[in-house]
Amino acid sequence: KAGVTQTPRYLIKTRGQQVTLSCSPISGHRSVSWYQQTPGQGLQFLFEYFSETQRNKGNFPGRFSGRQFSNSRSEMNVSTLELGDSALYLCASRLQADLISDTEAFFGQGTRLTVV
Amino acid sequence: LAKTTQPISMDSYEGQEVNITCSHNNIATNDYITWYQQFPSQGPRFIIQGYKTKVTNEVASLFIPADRKSSTLSLPRVSLSDTAVYYCLVGATSGTYKYIFGTGTRLKVLA
C-alpha cells in the first residue's frame, strides 16, 4: 500500500513568486491536512480538508490556501512568497475525520521550500 | 484544544528504558493522547495512542493516570536509531478536528 506522496520534494523560489505543492494521500483516505515546519516555530497546522471541504484552518495569512479534489488529492498554494515561508511543508492523510478513535495521521516526507 | 508540555530534550544510553512525560492539564473528555516520532527531514510517524490506563504495542507503552492530565511514553531498551523528536498531542475528532504539535522532546541515544 503506497504511503502519502508529496511532490516536489525540493523547491527553490524567488520572493514574490507563488508556489503550488501537491499531496496524494493513502488510497481510501479522505482527510488531508497540511503543516509547516520551521526550526523556529516547529510544526504548525495550516489547514485540513475532508471530502473537498476545508474543515479547519490554522493561523496563517490568506496567502496560504489549499484545495482538495474528488480523488482526495490535495494542493496547497502560497502566493507572494516571503523569505519566512522557507520551510518543510508536510501533508498528512487520515482514513476519515469523523471517528473519535480514528486519529492516526500518516505523513508524507514533505516538500522542502526555499525562498530566496 | 488542550496544550501539551514536554521536556525539551533528553539523553539516554543504548539498552535503557526511556520515559517521556507529557502534561496536558486541560484535556477534554473526548480527547485522545497520541505520540509521534520524527526523524530529521521526514514527516512524523505514529507511535501509539491511548485514552486511559495503559496501552502497549510492539514499539512502546503509554501510561495514562486516572485524571488524564499527563501521560508517559515508555520506550523499552532504546537503540541509536531511536534518536528523534517525540511529540505528544491531544485532540479529538468532533467535526472541528485539528492537531496541535508542541515543541516535542528531542531524545538523543548515546552508545
Image (cartoon, coloured by chain):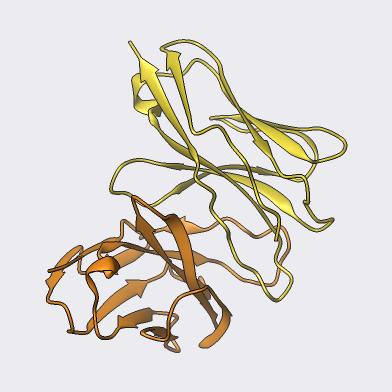
The answer to which quarter of the image holds residue B88 is top right
Relative to A54, say whether A45 is above or below. above
Q: Report x, y in % for residue B46.
A: 51, 46
Report whether A103 appears left or right of B105. right
Q: Report x, y in % for residue A102.
A: 65, 60
Quadrant of the rendering where the C terminus of chain B is positioned = top left
Quadrant of the rendering where the N terminus of chain B is positioned = bottom right
- Image point (73%, 62%), residue name: A100
Q: Report x, y in % for residue B55.
A: 71, 34
Q: Which chain is orange?
A: A
Q: Report x, y in % for residue B27.
A: 77, 51
Q: How many marks?
A: 0
Relative to A54, say whether B63 is above or below. above
- Image point (30%, 76%), residue name: A22
Relative to B1, say whether B76 is above or below. above
Q: In the current view of this chain or complex, which residue is farthest to the right?
A: B66
Q: Which chain is yellow?
A: B
- Image point (84%, 56%), residue name: B29
Q: Nearer the viewer, residue B60 or A116?
A: A116
Question: Can residue B69 be seen in this snapshot?
Answer: yes
Question: Can residue A3 be seen in this snapshot?
Answer: no
- Image point (35%, 60%), residue name: A2
